[in-house]
Image (tube, rainbow, N blue to C red):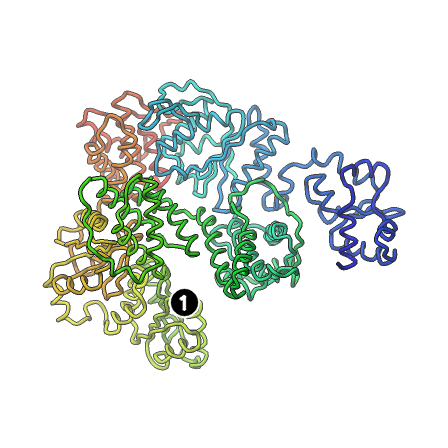
């Protein structure tokens, strides 16, 4: 051990339990004491003590003799970090004063990075909200994902205790409204509680969060996920302090609770206006990019300090790597920064787990996606210079705990990543596995673990909601658990296709098994002999299914599961082929790409305009560099006009290793087709090239081939595991969509994955196959739509776009079939007396009249929310239990929107001998005006 380390170790081992008494008696560690204890010359001790003080590890008390204390030990006593200007004190009394008064005087907000700069206003708002008599003000925190909304709410709670507005026993309840977004009844039950028998499955009375939070704070994250009825119940609680459980009619229960909500959305467009009006304090937290340069660097160092503490090793980070980490926060702000830091620290730890020295993080070793963060600062020289001011070429972070503001953190993984690495590395080393192979294995493991906890913050609620339309929630939950187990077993992530395909297949199997009919299976034993990995997983899944659903799974079903898993485990590229347009002239390429983007949206497409006076070498270098930037692993399609550009493809491939195919004589139509086939149809590079090499504009294909196609009946092929059960359900689903979009006859043909290629070849002889939908891409010259894209929010549009290519008549767009299903399913949950099927036509007519009167086409999201609300309002009219609107005014009744609501209401509900009250119409007005921006 080095001399300076011995001295520092001696100081750390000093007795700090009675520090207060030592200071009162002017005691402390001196150079002489250390010299005698360690047998080191006093001059050398003084030199090393000064160096430790300069490094910030110890604090110094001036005087004769000079006394020293361990900085970390003092910080633990005062429960905060000492700033640099508090590393030296005039005398023992100065430090004693801090020990006496610091905890009382400092607020929990004082340790929040930026509390005196970019967050100063927000902190003052929070303090005002907590201190306002008699019980504080309800607050809404607004900000992007990962800016620290939960942490900020937690600090408000701690500050209210610090200011003695709440006791140390007062509750702080956190709830994320997105957790039960797909089941509004369960969501409302969770927040307000329910009585016995309030709904099917309510076997016992349940206490809600509002009751549990009585006398404290209830933090509702993603509060915009509350349905309108839930928002109404919350603002009634805010107004009166009273509430009712589900199943109760009178609001007799009381709760003295401060509501803090948080949302990533614009409150004006995502929450009822009446709800927003009742929240007097709205705190907007800035994104990481909006924070000062110093704050961003401080946040980086703080997060690195936490990791160094966890690893128990110093971290040395290069300034370029620090800038890349700060720049790579486009999705999740501080949360993403934290996740990225954990990833690079874990990789650094892996590279040095058997060594004693510090962990080095440099730009060269960063993952490619994090390196891209450095280029985020391209063209932002001033911002980069400002950040550079606060970074040394190399910054050393010692393993000392940074500012821990809350005990639990939503971005904290529920496992010790470093322990996982050490344990697995030890096992592999004992087995004699080579170091390089160990690193490859565990690197994959790191990705699986970090992705699994970080992905929960990505907003995938819409996809889950769509899956729940056709499978039960218990099946989906089971599938999610199975997916995690398989990922852990294989050490790699499965894409969304697994969730959809397996849950559909399981639904089909359970239905067949429970029907008590003999299960029919085709003997496919010989097909799965070469799939031992998939077969092993299928056997494990057989046990899981039998245990979970109390049903026997035949051995032949295991073979079908093997086929399904094998197909899903194939390397399915989620990224798309990049399209790069390069032409001579000052703006030709840019113009063509802009047209394609306007028509098809932002795809993986870019342009390079080449002035005629540029040398071919410069042009080649530019295109090569752009190809490197664009490539996502599936190659680049290079669209050029003429000359030397036509020969660049092979050279770029040689230089970069990226597959490149080149098509000359580019036109706007060619660019549009290339982007469509890459972005919408997800075709591979060779398929796009083959389909475009003879393309000469729309109508420019071989007329004979087109004529031949038109003679055949149109068809869509669906591919699932067996071609039965699930594939048939998928067939019915697509047929429903086709009925709503066209009057032309289009067959939907289900087939099994094991026979896909052979069967498609046969089907093509008799049918014009428009597209293939399913779990497996057979890689043929037919557009393929993955099953997860079908159930995404734009799935119906994808089918329409492909069907249009054959000049098939498309009906005028009306409320989509998927939207109708969502409205009907939701009303089935909410309505007790009315039949959703019977009132749905009147509701759709209501929306249609509004759109005509307002000359405005509603987005499906707005239409769904509006019509669910109106459906519930109609039932309230039947029960004579109308809502009361508290802020009515004559200015509302005179608006075009309100008059349109009155007209639509009369036309649709008068024949039913029902009429919406003015109060109910005011609420509908609120829902419309938060989205509809008509100036009146």
Most foreground residue, 250 or 16:
16
Question: Can the viewer see residue 99?
Answer: yes
- Residue drawn 42% across the image and 53% down it: 489
Q: Quadrant of residue 815?
A: top left
Indicate the position of residue 382 as horizontal and vertical percent values: 58, 60
Q: Which residue is mark 1?
A: 631
Most foreground residue, 676 or 919:
676
For this view, does 136 lie left or right of residue 487?
Answer: right
Viewport quadrant of the N terminus: bottom right
Question: Can the viewer see residue 812?
Answer: no
Circle 1 packing at 10 Å, graded few (<14), some (14-19), many (20+), is many
For this view, does 610 lie left or right of residue 7?
Answer: left
Indicate the position of residue 934 as horizontal and vertical percent values: 34, 42
Viewport quadrant of the C terminus: top left
Q: How many marks?
A: 1
Indicate the position of residue 825 as horizontal and vertical percent values: 27, 36
Relative height, residue 709 to residue 744 (above, below): below
For this view, does 746 lie left or right of residue 320?
Answer: left
Relative height, residue 436 to residue 41 (above, below): below
- Residue drawn 55% across the image and 66% down it: 364
Relative height, residue 145 to residue 528 (above, below): above
Q: Residue furthest right?
A: 64
- Residue drawn 19% across the image and 40% down it: 516
Indicate the position of residue 729 as horizontal and vertical percent values: 21, 47
Label 1's element?
A: loop
Q: Residue furthest left?
A: 711
Relative height, residue 312 to residue 272 (above, below): below
Q: Quadrant of residue 106?
A: top right
């Amino acid at each position: 051990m080095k001399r300076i380390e011995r001295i520092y170790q001696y100081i750390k081992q000093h007795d700090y339990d009675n520090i207060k008494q030592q200071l009162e008696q002017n005691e402390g560690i001196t150079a002489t004491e250390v010299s005698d204890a360690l047998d080191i010359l006093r001059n050398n001790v003084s030199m090393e003590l000064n160096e430790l003080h300069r490094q910030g590890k110890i604090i110094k008390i001036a005087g004769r003799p000079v006394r020293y204390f361990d900085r970390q030990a003092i910080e633990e006593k005062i429960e905060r970090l000492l700033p640099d200007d508090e590393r030296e004190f005039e005398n023992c009394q100065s430090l004693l004063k801090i020990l006496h008064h610091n905890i009382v005087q400092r607020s929990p907000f004082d340790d929040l990075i930026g509390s005196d700069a970019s967050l100063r206003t927000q902190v003052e708002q929070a303090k005002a909200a907590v201190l306002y008599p008699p019980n504080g003000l309800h607050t809404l925190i607004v900000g992007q994902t990962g800016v620290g909304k939960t942490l900020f709410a937690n600090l408000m709670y701690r500050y209210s205790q610090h200011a003695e507005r709440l006791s140390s026993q007062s509750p702080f309840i956190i709830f994320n409204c997105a957790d039960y977004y797909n089941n509004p009844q369960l969501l409302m039950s969770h927040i307000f509680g329910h009585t016995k028998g309030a709904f099917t499955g309510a076997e016992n009375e349940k206490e809600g969060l509002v009751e549990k939070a009585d006398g404290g704070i209830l933090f509702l994250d993603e509060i915009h996920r509350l349905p309108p009825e839930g928002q109404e119940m919350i603002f009634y609680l805010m107004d009166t302090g009273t509430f009712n459980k589900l199943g109760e009619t009178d609001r007799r229960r009381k709760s003295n609770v401060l509501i803090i909500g948080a949302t990533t959305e614009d409150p004006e467009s995502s929450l009822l206006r009446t709800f927003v009006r009742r929240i007097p304090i709205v705190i907007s937290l800035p994104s990481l990019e909006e924070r000062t340069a110093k704050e961003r660097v401080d946040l980086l160092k703080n997060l690195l300090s936490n990791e160094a503490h966890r690893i128990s090793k110093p971290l040395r980070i290069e300034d370029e790597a620090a800038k890349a980490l700060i720049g790579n926060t486009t999705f999740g702000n501080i949360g993403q920064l934290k996740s990225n830091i954990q990833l690079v620290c874990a990789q650094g730890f892996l590279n040095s787990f058997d060594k004693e020295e510090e962990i080095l993080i440099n730009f060269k070793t960063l993952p490619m996606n994090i390196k891209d963060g450095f280029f985020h600062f391209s063209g932002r020289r001033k911002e980069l210079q400002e950040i550079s001011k606060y970074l040394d070429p190399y910054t050393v972070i010692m393993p000392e705990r940074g500012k821990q503001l809350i005990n639990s953190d939503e971005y904290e993984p529920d496992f010790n990543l470093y322990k996982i690495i050490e344990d697995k590395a030890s096992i592999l080393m004992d087995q004699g596995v080579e170091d390089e192979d160990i690193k490859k294995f565990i690197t994959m493991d790191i990705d699986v673990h970090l992705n699994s906890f970080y992905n929960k913050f990505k907003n995938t609620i819409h996809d889950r909601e769509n899956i729940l339309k056709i499978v039960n929630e218990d099946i989906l939950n089971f599938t999610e658990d199975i997916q995690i187990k398989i990922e852990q077993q294989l050490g790699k992530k499965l894409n969304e296709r697994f969730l959809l395909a397996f849950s559909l297949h399981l639904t089909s199997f359970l239905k067949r098994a429970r029907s008590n009919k003999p299960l029919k299976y085709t003997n496919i034993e010989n097909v799965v002999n070469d799939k031992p990995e998939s077969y092993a997983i299928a056997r494990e899944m057989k046990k899981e299914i039998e245990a979970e659903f109390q049903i026997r799974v035949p051995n032949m079903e295991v073979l079908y599961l093997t086929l399904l898993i094998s197909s899903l485990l194939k390397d399915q590229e989620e990224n798309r082929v990049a399209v790069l347009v390069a032409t001579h002239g000052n703006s030709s390429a840019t113009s063509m790409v802009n047209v394609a983007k306007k028509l098809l949206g932002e795809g993986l497409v870019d342009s390079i305009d080449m002035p005629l006076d540029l040398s071919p070498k410069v042009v080649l270098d530019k295109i090569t560099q752009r190809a490197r930037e664009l490539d996502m692993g599936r190659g680049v399609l290079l669209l050029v006009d003429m000359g030397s550009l036509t020969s660049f493809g092979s050279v770029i491939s040689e230089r970069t290793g990226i597959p490149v195919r080149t098509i000359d004589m580019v036109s706007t139509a060619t660019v549009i087709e290339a982007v469509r086939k890459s972005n919408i149809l997800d075709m591979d590079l060779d398929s796009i090239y083959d389909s475009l090499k003879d393309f000469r504009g729309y109508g420019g294909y071989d007329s004979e081939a087109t004529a031949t196609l038109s003679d055949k009946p149109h068809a869509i092929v669906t591919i699932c595991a067996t071609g039965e059960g699930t594939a048939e359900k998928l067939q019915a689903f697509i047929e429903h969509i086709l009925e709503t979009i066209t009057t032309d006859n289009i067959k939907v043909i289900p087939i099994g994955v094991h026979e896909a290629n052979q069967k498609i070849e046969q089907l093509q002889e008799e049918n014009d196959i428009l597209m293939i939908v399913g779990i497996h891409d057979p890689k043929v010259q037919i557009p393929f739509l993955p099953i997860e894209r079908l159930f995404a929010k734009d799935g119906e549009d994808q089918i329409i776009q492909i069907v249009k290519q054959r000049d098939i008549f498309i009906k005028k767009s009306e409320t989509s079939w998927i939207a109708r299903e969502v409205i009907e399913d939701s009303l089935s949950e909410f309505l007790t007396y009315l039949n959703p099927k019977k009132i749905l036509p009147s509701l759709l007519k209501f929306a249609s009249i509004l759109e005509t009167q307002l000359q405005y086409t509603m987005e499906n999201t707005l239409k769904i929310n509006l019509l669910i609300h109106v459906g519930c309002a109609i039932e309230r009219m039947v029960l004579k239990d109308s809502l009361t609107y508290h802020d009515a005014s004559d200015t509302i009744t005179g608006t075009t929107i309100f008059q349109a609501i009155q007209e639509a209401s009369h036309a649709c509900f008068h024949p039913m001998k029902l009429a919406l009250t003015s109060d109910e119409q005011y609420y509908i007005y609120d829902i419309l005006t938060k989205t509809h921006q008509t100036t009146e």
